[in-house]
Amino acid sequence: MSGALATTSQVSAAAPTPSGPTAIATTTAVAPGLYAIVTYPVHLSGGSGKFAGATGDLDSIGEADLGSGRIVLRYYGQICFAKED
């Protein structure tokens, strides 16, 4: 069994928050309630705080354990922050 998982991030209202389109993770089941995340591309296009004006792309792999509610990701890519005045 495989599928896709749409995610958004949720953080404190006071924290700097990145923004961008909804990220879609492609998954495959490896055991009951355990999924391998085989591709999870994330595009960043601004946000609040230190993410204002930031752009970038990250690619991730990992696993999601629905029994414990934990997700572990390994990611790579680049985020470019806006130049401070």
Image (cartoon, grey):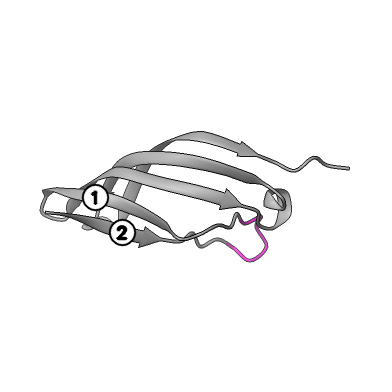
- Say what amino acid the circle numbered 2 marks: Leu
Name the residue that disc number 2 marks: 5
Name the residue that disc number 1 marks: 27
Return the residue found at the far bottom.
Answer: 13
Q: Which numbered marker is on residue 67? A: none
The image shows residue 28 at horizontal and vertical percentages of: 18, 48
- Mark 1 lies on a secondary structure that is strand
Q: Is residue 71 above or below residue 67?
A: above
User: Which is nearer the eye, 43 or 50?
Assistant: 43
The image shows residue 69 at horizontal and vertical percentages of: 30, 57
Identify which residue is drawn at 55% across, 57% down: 20
- Say what amino acid the circle numbered 1 marks: Thr
Identify which residue is drawn at 27% across, 57% down: 4
- Mark 2 lies on a secondary structure that is strand
Q: Is residue 51 above or below residue 14?
A: above
How packed mark 2 is, by other alpha carbons closer than 10 Å (few <14, some 14-19, many 20 or more), is few
Residue 63 falls within the magenta-colored stretch: no
Mark 1 or mark 2, which is nearer the start of the sequence? 2
Return the residue found at the far right.
Answer: 85
Q: Quadrant of the N terminus?
A: bottom left
Q: Write the start and end of the magenta stretch as one range.
A: 12-17
Tell me the chief SS of the magenta region.
loop
Q: Is residue 49 left or right of residue 78?
A: right
